[in-house]
Image (spheres, helix red, strand yellow):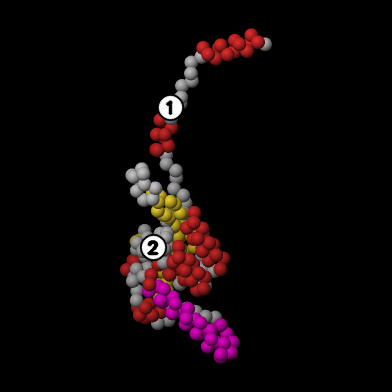
Amino acid sequence: MGKFETGDVEEEKDQPEPALPDLSQFLLMNDMNPEPAKLRLIGLYGEVNEDRAAETTFSLMALKVMGKREELVNPDDLESKETKTTYDPIDFVVSTWGGSAADMFSIYDTMRVVREDVEICTTGLGKVMSAGVLLLAAGTKGKRKIGENCRLMLHVVTSGQHGNLTDLENEMAEAQWTQDRLIHCLSKESNMTKKYIKKLLDKRMNVYLTAEEAVDLGIADEII
């Protein structure tokens, strides 16, 4: 047993030191194949209702947190440790016939808060109608796109209430408040004045717009 151990040690001494692996090719391949970009896309496709509003609002808030990064203010200065917070943009696709005004406002207010730090790139496809128009317009200015064949539609707020006269008057007042807020918010997000929007809605019928008209009115920035 002793001889076996001694001979084993001597054999190891006679062997040359193993060469270190050449990592240059691996590093070169790594540079040529950077990490793929993360998908940061949400969509509102269909009716604006409570379920879709919940998905959209929580997704916007979650993507904001997940896209947060700390970067050096001056990466060329090796001694500087000063950092800044940046956020990756969010893509938001809208294609809807419209729906609940209350759920529309919940998404809109979430977008307003999130876009203070994060670019929200909205894209309107197919149909962007009623409640969807404000959501398309609420994207970051310069980052709002619309499909060439997309149709937009605006109309007055509708209320399907019934009951005694007092109840109806109360509900009509609430519907008027909703319409006033919609006009106020849409005028802030587009090139349209409140007076212009009211004039459109005073027609008491659905007002259809082309993609070109949407860009002219400042609802979108670019046709795709």
Q: What residue is shown with label 2?
A: 140
Circle 1: residue type: Asp
Q: What residue is shown with label 1?
A: 22
> Which SS type dominates the magenta stretch?
helix
Where disc 2 sits, the SS reads: loop
Examine the image and state in which quarter residue 149 appears.
bottom left
Q: Position of residue 120 (x, y in %)?
A: 42, 60
Which quarter of the figure is the N terminus placed in? top right
Residue 46 as seen in the image, left or right of residue 211:
right
Residue drawn at 46 percent across, 26 percent down: 21
Question: Which residue in the rendered view is the most extreme toward the right?
Answer: 1
- The stretch in magenta equals 161-187
Q: Position of residue 167 (x, y in %)?
A: 57, 87
Residue 58 as seen in the image, left or right of residue 120:
right
Crowdedness of circle 2 by 10 Å Cα count: few (<14), some, many (20+)?
many
Residue 127 vertical placement versus 33 (above, below): below
Q: Position of residue 53 (x, y in %)?
A: 53, 66
* Membership of 16 in magenta stretch: no
Residue drawn at 53 percent across, 86 percent down: 170
Nearer to me, 91 or 95: 91
